[in-house]
């Protein structure tokens, strides 16, 4: 039977093919249009039309004609018709083009001359992510993972909004979840495997953490909340979490009734048929103690707290160029493999060139405009531009700096998979080497090397003198 239908199909295909062949070979005045040949190849009657694409109107940004290796940031705002030109290289782009991309990514349009070779994509704007819309206008979520940044194997991120009273429904997942509250306030709740309970309210600037498998829920408080989630798995997806709604919908009701001690089948008559994900709820009581349910195991112990009120922490490093506030297991022990820094970089200043020894770095930009230059070995280096709402990803050992290229403070988060926050500062490294080694290697003068500092600077206030 299968072989019969197979040979019948083959016969049909052959018949179609030979019909087609006949039509090509012998066009007739019938339904098959003749194939035009008069547009193929050279013909004296085909002449090209000379548009003057060499004579387009444009202006150059400050610094654009400098030697490429100076590589200063080019601000194309208020520059007429920005062009891919740097120093003596490049040329004009007559179009087609979308100038909005060029204004956001000047280091892509006219890269510094120091960029070289290929560096994998290190950037994903959440503004280009698909929005998963919650039920009843209760909120939304969007994500960046390995699908958007192929090198982002260790971590993935989600940006989520819950309106006042809205829930991210009760759920759990295989990955560990570290979260930073971006705006507003939220109530978080969890029950662990020992039957210990946890509930807390957080503000913008605070963090929470849930170990793999620990079920939790989140509810927007007065005015709602927006937060960032970081997972210790680059292929994490918000579409792949274990949900209370789905769990109950997928159990036989006979089993549910038995499991809950012989409740009637009618008890389950109105459960949701499937995923709720983000949905409107009853406003959380302002008095959190009303939701402080305790079993015989009591509360999750303070040392194991799932939240850390980092909004009230003082910065670990304060420099003329900005501040660094570290949130790592030394202050937030439950998040034993998440080490983060909340970094503020003032206009013109730079988070110094550094690398991380044991972890990739996941970034999120909260405010301002910055550029990151990545050196990736084998001569490869590339510069990327970032704005509020963008994620970034820098594989371990690759050097990077974060330069504020805008008029306002840059605020961004560095997240590592590490038991404490650390980096190798290039400035400190060469500052601690015997000077002759540096002089021999980099062909610098004694005067230059004598200026190197022996301590990490973290953020350097920058006024570059030509
Ligand atoms: C938080 O949201 C309010 C209301 O939209 C806005 O005015 C404020 O700038 C937001 N804060 C941050 C840090 O984005
Ligand atoms: C070091 O710099 C000096 C002065 O510019 C130059 O003459 C010399 O060739 C350089 N040496 C090397 C090894 O590049
Ligand atoms: C640099 O300093 C070292 C040690 O102080 C000295 O021996 C050397 O001559 C100096 N080199 C130059 C080029 O000044």
Image (spheres, rainbow, N blue to C red):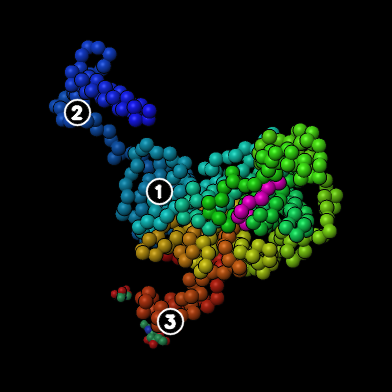
Q: Position of residue 466 (x, y in %)?
A: 42, 65
The CA distance from mark 2 to mark 3 is 68 Å
Please tell me whether mark 2 or mark 3 is closer to you in this view: 2
Name which quarter of the figure residue 113 lies in: bottom left
Q: Is residue 202 left or right of residue 405?
A: right
Name the residue that disc number 3 marks.
435
Asked if residue 165 can be seen in this view, the reply is no
455 w.r.t. 26: above or below = below
Q: Residue at x 77, y 64 (%)?
A: 302
The secondary structure type at the circle numbered 1 is helix
Q: Position of residue 247 (x, y in %)?
A: 68, 43
Q: Residue at x 69, y 41 (%)?
A: 251
Mark before the other along the chain sequence, 2 or 3: 2
Disc number for residue 109: 1
Name the residue that disc number 2 marks.
40
The CA distance from mark 2 to mark 1 is 36 Å
**Mark 2–mark 1 CB contact (< 8 Å):** no
Local crowd size for mark 3, using a 10 Å CA cut-off: few (<14), some (14–19), many (≥20): some
Q: Which segment is the magenta one?
A: 170-178
Mark before the other along the chain sequence, 1 or 3: 1
Mark before the other along the chain sequence, 2 or 1: 2
345 w.r.t. 52: above or below = below
**Mark 2–mark 3 CB contact (< 8 Å):** no
Name which quarter of the figure residue 199 lies in: bottom right
Local crowd size for mark 2, using a 10 Å CA cut-off: few (<14), some (14–19), many (≥20): few
Q: Does the magenta segment cover residue 175?
A: yes
281 w.r.t. 39: above or below = below
Looking at the rendered image, the quarter that the N terminus falls into is top left
Q: Does the magenta segment cover residue 226?
A: no
Report if the beta carbon of the residue with label 3 is closer than 8 angstroms to ligand 3.
Answer: yes
């Amino acid at each position: 039977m299968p072989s019969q239908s197979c040979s019948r199909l083959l016969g049909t295909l052959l018949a179609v093919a030979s019909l087609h062949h006949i039509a090509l070979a012998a066009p007739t005045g019938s339904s098959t249009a003749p194939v035009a040949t008069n547009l193929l190849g050279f013909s004296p009657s085909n002449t090209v039309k000379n548009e003057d694409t060499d004579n387009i109107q444009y202006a150059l940004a400050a610094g654009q004609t400098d030697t490429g290796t100076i590589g200063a940031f080019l601000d194309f705002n208020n520059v007429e018709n920005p062009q891919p030109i740097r120093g003596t290289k490049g040329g004009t782009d007559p179009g087609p083009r979308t100038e909005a991309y060029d204004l956001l990514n000047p280091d892509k349009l006219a890269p510094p001359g120091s960029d070289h070779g290929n560096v994998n994509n290190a950037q994903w704007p959440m503004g280009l992510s698909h929005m998963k819309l919650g039920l009843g206008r209760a909120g939304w979520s969007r994500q960046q993972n390995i699908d958007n940044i192929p090198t982002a194997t260790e971590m993935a991120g989600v940006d989520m909004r819950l309106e006042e009273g809205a829930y991210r429904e009760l759920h759990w997942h295989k990955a560990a979840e570290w979260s930073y509250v971006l705006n507003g306030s939220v109530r978080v709740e969890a029950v662990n495997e020992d039957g210990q309970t946890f509930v807390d309210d957080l503000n913008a600037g605070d963090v929470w953490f849930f170990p793999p498998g620990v079920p939790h829920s989140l509810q927007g408080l007065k005015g709602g909340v927006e937060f960032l989630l970081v997972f210790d798995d680059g292929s994490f997806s918000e579409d792949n979490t274990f949900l209370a709604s789905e769990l109950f919908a997928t159990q036989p009701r006979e089993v549910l009734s038995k499991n809950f001690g012989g409740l009637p089948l009618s008890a389950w008559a109105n459960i949701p048929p499937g995923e709720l994900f983000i949905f409107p709820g009853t406003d959380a009581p302002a008095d959190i103690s009303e939701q402080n349910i305790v079993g015989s195991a009591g509360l999750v112990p303070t040392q194991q707290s799932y939240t850390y009120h980092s909004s009230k922490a003082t910065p670990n490093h304060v420099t003329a160029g900005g501040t660094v506030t570290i949130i790592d297991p030394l202050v937030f022990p439950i998040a034993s493999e998440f080490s983060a820094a909340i970094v503020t970089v003032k206009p013109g200043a730079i988070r110094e060139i550094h690398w991380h020894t044991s972890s990739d770095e996941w970034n999120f930009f909260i405010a301002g405009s910055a550029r990151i230059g990545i050196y990736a070995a084998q001569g490869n280096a590339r510069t990327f531009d970032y704005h509020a709402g963008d994620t970034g990803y820098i594989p371990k050992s690759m050097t990077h700096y974060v330069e504020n290229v805008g008029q306002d403070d840059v605020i961004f988060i560095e997240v590592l998979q590490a038991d404490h926050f650390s980096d190798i500062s290039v400035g400190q490294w060469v500052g601690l080497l015997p000077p002759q080694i540096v002089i021999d290697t980099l062909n610098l003068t004694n005067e230059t090397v004598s200026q190197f500092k022996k301590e990490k600077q973290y953020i350097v206030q920058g006024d570059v003198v030509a």
